[in-house]
């Protein structure tokens, strides 16, 4: 990104959100909008505990439905019906648009705090570039402002929780992160991969620097906060955690509701442009495995996780575009020794691992949804900002978001074509699926390649 372009970053971000607001006034994706209206009407007029019994189509978990319930009750308080009010349809889009704005703010904060000393030219340019990339991400714009899907809300919780982990130095950071990250997973379970890798890779090199007492206190507070968050979100919907003692006497459980959501759609991929589409040669009912012994989605994911952990070693050896930000970090507050320096030095590989892991889960697991790649798109922008707008990372972020936008666009447009139109209905999915695989491979190679800084500073 050029200096002249980044100098106008406020204008660029403003234009991106003006475009979102214009799209929010247009009709959304019909099926999803009607479904959300029906849920909203039930949540506004009946106890939340009755939702799953009254709405068989309710395939979202309590972490997501709480937001819908709050919005529906707000409209009901001013005598506006979620099922028929045009304002409610627009509000369904304004929620993720507001979340997009928070994502822009979070990537700005991370770049300013972690790139350089926090007040240098490089940090400012990285923050501006990250803000512009996040604001103009094609997938974010289309998913939030056209479809009215709330993936940005779960992404805010994920990134906010990781910010508490990566930036927090007080004891409250652990329970605050636990609340946000637990809520994110209770909205979108695939986010668990980003949580485990983003926290685990960051924490591992710090184990020797953190006192046992502080680690124990932080761990206990995090577990208690996570448990309290789970119960607070689930019990209003009469949902327990798992069958048996952890069901807490409720008729439904998180495990059961997740299984119900998967069973609603008898396809291996639910519009997800991943490797299973490539193996099948068409997107509508790919096989559940390759047909080869021991080669299943979970085995492939295990291999991808091993590759990711090996890549973390590449960052640790000073390779990859993260080398620039690592050198700059040790000049910042806290110096190169002590918790401060170690903390900032481990964020880049943690962000890369979280991105690679959640991207891999989208690519290789069956029953994946087309928007399960969404957190990877957000984290790729964060990685680009932390790597001081390294050209390769910027292009990967743009490519992944554009491929996802093409996929959701063709679901809008091409799905209306007759089944006999194989080329229109299938070929674009296969091209986009191959593109995602290429992006992931290039992302995996990043830690082992030399940095190529952008013309931003």
Image (tube, rainbow, N blue to C red):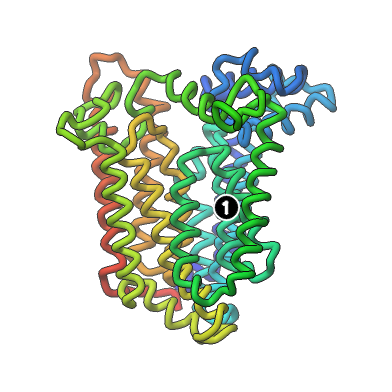
- Dot 1 corresponds to which residue? 15
Can residue 285 be seen by looking at this rendering?
A: yes
In the image, residue 355 above or below residue 171: above
Q: Which residue lies furthest to the left in this view?
A: 292
Snapshot quadrant of residue 219: bottom right
Quarter occupied by the N terminus: bottom left
Residue situated in front as seen by the camera: 16 or 280:
280
Q: Residue at the location (56% across, 50% down)?
A: 158
Residue 147 in picture, x, y percent from top left? 52, 32
Q: Residue at the location (59% across, 46% down)?
A: 182
> In the shown orientation, is residue 425 left or right of residue 383?
left
Residue 197 in picture, x, y percent from top left? 44, 56
Q: Residue at the location (15% across, 33% down)?
A: 292
Quarter occupied by the C terminus: bottom left
In the image, residue 136 above or below residue 72: below
Residue situated in front as seen by the camera: 385 or 89:
385
């Amino acid at each position: 990104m050029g200096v002249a372009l980044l100098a106008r970053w406020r204008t660029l971000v403003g234009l991106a959100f003006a475009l979102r607001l214009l799209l929010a006034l247009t009709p959304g994706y019909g099926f999803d909008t009607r479904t959300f209206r029906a849920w909203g009407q039930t949540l506004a007029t009946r106890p939340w505990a009755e939702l799953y019994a009254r709405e068989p189509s309710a395939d979202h978990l309590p972490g997501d439905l709480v937001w819908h319930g709050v919005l529906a009750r707000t409209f009901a308080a001013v005598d506006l019906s979620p099922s028929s009010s045009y304002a409610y349809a627009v509000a369904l889009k304004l929620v993720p648009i507001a979340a997009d704005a928070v994502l822009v703010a979070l990537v700005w904060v991370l770049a300013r705090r972690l790139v350089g000393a926090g007040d240098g030219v490089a940090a400012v340019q990285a923050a501006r570039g990250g803000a512009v990339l996040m604001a103009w991400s094609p997938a974010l714009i289309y998913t939030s402002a056209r479809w009215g899907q709330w993936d940005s809300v779960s992404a805010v919780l994920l990134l906010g929780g990781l910010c508490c982990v990566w930036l927090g130095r007080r004891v409250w950071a652990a329970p605050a992160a636990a609340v946000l990250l637990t809520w994110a997973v209770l909205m979108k379970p695939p986010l668990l991969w980003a949580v485990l890798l983003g926290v685990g890779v960051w924490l591992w090199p710090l184990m020797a620097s953190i006192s046992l007492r502080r680690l124990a206190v932080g761990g206990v507070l995090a577990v208690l906060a996570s448990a309290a968050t789970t119960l607070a979100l689930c019990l209003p919907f009469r949902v327990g955690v798992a069958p048996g003692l952890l069901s807490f006497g409720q008729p439904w459980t998180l495990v059961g509701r997740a299984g119900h959501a998967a069973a609603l759609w008898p396809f291996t991929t639910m519009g997800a442009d991943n490797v299973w589409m490539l193996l099948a040669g068409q997107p509508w009912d790919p096989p559940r495995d390759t047909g080869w012994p021991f080669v299943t989605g979970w085995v492939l994911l295990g291999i991808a996780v091993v590759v990711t952990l090996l890549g973390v070693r590449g960052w640790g050896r000073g390779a990859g575009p993260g080398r620039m930000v690592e050198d700059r970090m040790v000049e910042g507050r806290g110096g190169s020794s002590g918790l401060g320096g170690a903390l900032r030095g481990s964020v880049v590989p943690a962000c890369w691992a979280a991105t690679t892991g959640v991207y891999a889960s989208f690519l290789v697991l069956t029953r994946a949804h087309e928007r399960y790649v969404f957190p990877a798109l957000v984290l790729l922008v964060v990685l680009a900002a932390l790597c001081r707008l390294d050209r390769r990372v910027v292009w990967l972020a743009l490519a992944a978001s554009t491929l996802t936008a093409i996929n959701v666009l063709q679901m809008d447009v091409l799905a209306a074509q007759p089944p006999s139109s194989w080329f229109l209905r299938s070929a674009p999915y296969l091209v986009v699926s191959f593109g995602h695989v290429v992006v992931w491979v290039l992302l995996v190679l990043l830690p082992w390649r030399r940095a190529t800084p952008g013309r931003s500073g």
